[in-house]
Image (cartoon, helix red, strand yellow):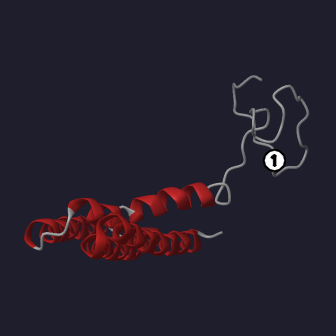
Amino acid sequence: MPATEQLATIEKMNLVLGVAAVAAGGLLWGARGMLAAGAGAALSAANFWALRRLGARAVARVEAGATTGQALLLVASLAGKMMLLFALVWVAVRRIGLPVFPFTLGLSAFVASALVGGLYLGPRGLKVRPAAGVPGAGSSPSSTTSSSSSADTTPDLPGHTH
């Protein structure tokens, strides 16, 4: 599964967990808690949306041979996004007066979706095959047989003895 599809899956999980946080906020803290959890979940979804797009743009430009200055500009845009996030959290809690716990519950949908998505997608996104003989890597540690295909063999390093 390509990385863009994995990120889209995590983004969908973020929305689903955000809805669950809103429901939990309503059940635990009533209408005010549901509003705060909804605001946190909306901020969480917007944050991930922006992070995904800025990150993809940064990677694409670096792959295309961007200069250090161009790369630093993209890093600065990610830092600006974080500063905006911090400011919006401050406004929501200090100025608007949203309850902290339900707001945090909604905002944490991003963290939960990244964790659950990583655990769910991790085995599918495995790019490097585990070494033969590693316990739990599909072969037993006592096995001494190796595959003879050229795709599975690694070249011997000079001066390296087995």
Q: In this view of the protein, which residue sits in the foreground, 13 or 140?
A: 13
Q: Is residue 83 visible?
A: yes
Count of marks placed on residues: 1
Q: Quadrant of the N terminus?
A: bottom right
Q: Quadrant of the C terminus?
A: top right
Residue that label 1 marks: 152
Quadrant of res 46 = bottom left
Quadrant of res 86 = bottom left
Q: Position of residue 41 (x, y in %)?
A: 35, 72
Q: Which amino acid type is marked by label 1?
A: Asp
The single residue placed furthest to the top in the displayed view is 161
Whether residue 56 sits left or right of residue 84 in the image: it is right
Whether residue 48 sits left or right of residue 104 in the image: it is right
Give the residue at x 89% y 49%: 149
Give the residue at x 18% y 69%: 98
Q: Position of residue 101 (x, y in %)?
A: 26, 59
Q: Position of residue 146 (x, y in %)?
A: 88, 37
Q: Is residue 60 visible?
A: no
Q: In this view of the protein, which residue sits in the foreground, 40 or 136?
A: 40
Q: In this view of the protein, which residue sits in the foreground, 82 or 21?
A: 21
The single residue placed furthest to the left in the displayed view is 95
Give the residue at x 49% y 73%: 16
Quadrant of res 9 = bottom right
Q: Residues within 10 Å of mark 1 (few under 14, many from 20)?
A: few
Whether residue 31 sits left or right of residue 83 in the image: it is right
Q: Position of residue 136 (x, y in %)?
A: 75, 37
- In what element is the residue under mark 1? loop
